[in-house]
Image: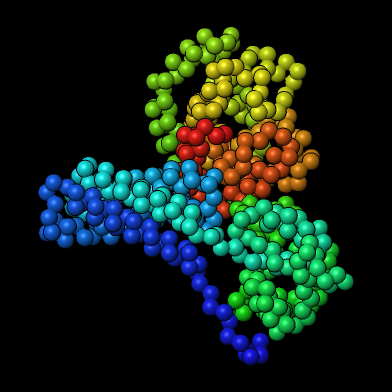
Amino acid sequence: MDCNTQLPQKRFLLKKTDKFWSAYDFLSGAIAFTIGLALTPWSNESFLSNHWWLIIVYGLAVFLCTRIVDLPNPSAHSSSKIYETVVFSLMSSVIAITILAVIKLIFTYTLLGRYVMAISALACWILLWAGRILASKIITPHKTRIILFGTGDLAQSMYTRLEEKSNFEVCGFWGTDAASEINQLPLINPDNLEDAAKELNALEAKIIIICVDDNSPVDLSLQKVLVDLPLHGFYVLNKGAFIEKYFAEISAEYMSFHWTTSFFAMSASSQTFMLKRVIDICLSIFGLLVTAPIYPLIALLIKLDSPGGVFFYQKRVGYLGKHFDIIKFRTMGTDAEKDGAQWAKKNDTRVTRLGKFLRLSRIDELPQLWNVLKGDMSIVGPRPERPEFVSELMQEIPYYERRHLVPPGLTGWAQICYRYGASKDDARKKLQFDLYYIKHLSILQDIKIILKTLPMIAKGSR
C-alpha cells in the first residue's frame, strides 16, 4: 500500500501497560474495601449492598493516589525501586482511605469504622505492592525502540544516555554519513515519506529524536518528512523535548535566547504562587508546633556533643537573588570554615558525631520551617545556595540564575531525582531538574514532591 494512502497507526492516550495498571489499581481498591466490609463482625449481604458506592469511591481514590505519587509500573521496574514501590503503595492506600472517610462524613454525616479503614488500607497496600513486584519478576520490561536523527556529538551523547536506560533501545541512526553503520547500528537515509515509514517500521522504531542544532539546518524536503511522520504513528521530538518529557529535566543544550527570555512567562500563575504561599504558611506552622517539644532535647544533645551554639546561621540566595539567613541545628564544629567557604563532602570530617545523625534524619533542617513561615523559603523549591558559590556557578553554568525565579525550598525535584551533591558538576546536573520544576510548577507537582520526600527521609537518604 502506498504510504500516502496508508491509514495512520492507531495511537492511544495511555499505553496498554498504563491501562492495565490503572484498572489494577482501581480493582485493588475496590477489592480491598470489599474485604474490609466483609470482615466486620456485623457484615451481611445487605450490609455490603448498601455500601456499594463506597467500594467504587475507594477504588477511584486509590487510582488517583497511585497516579499522584507515580507508583512505579513493572515496565520501568528494577530491584532498586522495590522500596519506593512498597512505601508509595502504603501512602496511596492510607491517603485514599482518608479521602473516603471524609467523603462519607460529608454525604452521610456518619464516620467510617476504624476497623473497616484499617483492614481496607492493609489489604489495598498488599495488593498494590505485591502485584507490581510479582509482575516485575515474571514480565520482561518493554523497550521503546528509538531512531536518532543525526550522527554528530548531540546524537552520540543521546545514544550514551539512552544506553543507560532499561526502557529505551536505540535501533539506528538517521543521517547522510558515508558509513552504513554507526555504533554497530544501521544508518538510514530516506529522502521521502514512503521510504521513511517503511524503514522505520522495519526497524520497529516508535520515536525519532532530532539530534541536530541550529548550525546544522535540515533540508526543507526532509523537514516535510519529519513533520508528516506523526500522521503515520511515529513520535518525532527534538532532543530537548524528549529529555523534558521522559527524563523530567530541562537540557541546557537546547535553551535558546528566545526560550530563556520567555521562561518566566511559562511558569505558574500568580494564583498558584498565592496558594503555594498559603500552603507554606499552614504546613510550617503545623510543623513548628509538632516538632517544638523535641527542640530542648536536641539543643541539650548538641551542647553535650560539642562546644558552640545550638543553631547555625548562614547567608543563602533566595527568590530573585535576595539574600537571607538560613537557620539550622548546628552539625559541624565552630571552626568548620576557618579556611573559608567549602563545599560539603560525603563523610565530611567537619561534621560532629551527633551532626551525622541529624543530617541523615534531616532533623537539622527543622528550624528552616521558620524561614518558610517568614517567606524566605517555600516547602518545595530549588535548594538555596551560598552567595560565594552562586557567583562562581553563575559564571560557569549557563542559566544558573534561573533557579531564583521561584522561592528556594526545604525539598525539591532535584533533591528526589538526583543524589546528594556538593560540587560544580552536581550543581550543573541538578540545575536541569530545578529548571524542569520551575517550568512545570503546580500545586499537584508540589504535593507529589512532598510525598516522594517522605520515604527518602525514612530511608535516610539526603
Tell me how many marks there are.
0
Q: Is residue 226 above or below residue 318?
A: below
User: Is residue 324 something one can see in this rendering?
Assistant: yes
Give the farthest residue toward the front: 138
Left/right of residue 103 with respect to residue 228 in the rendered view: left
Q: Is residue 236 left or right of residue 271?
A: right
Q: Is residue 381 visible?
A: no
169 or 94, which lies in front? 169
* Image quadrant containing the N terminus: bottom right
Residue 290 spot, x, y in % from top left = 39, 27
Q: Position of residue 60 (x, y in %)?
A: 34, 58
Q: Position of residue 273 (x, y in %)?
A: 51, 47
Residue 153 % position (x, y)? 81, 58
- Residue drawn where x is 45% and y is 19% of the image: 295
Q: How is the image coloured?
A: rainbow
Q: Is residue 230 above or below residue 341?
A: below
Give above or below for 171 relative to 298: below
Looking at the rendered image, the quarter that the C terminus falls into is top right
The image quadrant of residue 240 is bottom right
Residue positioned 64% across, 13% down in the render: 334
Say which residue appears at 82% left-offset and 61% top-offset.
Answer: 152
Quarter holding residue 181: bottom right
Q: Is residue 73 left or right of residue 146?
A: left
81, 354: nearer the viewer: 81
Judge left or right: residue 267 versus residue 400: left
| Residue drawn at point x = 35 percent, y = 48 percent | 126
Residues 71 and 324: in front is: 71
Q: Nearer the viewer, residue 54 or 315?
A: 54
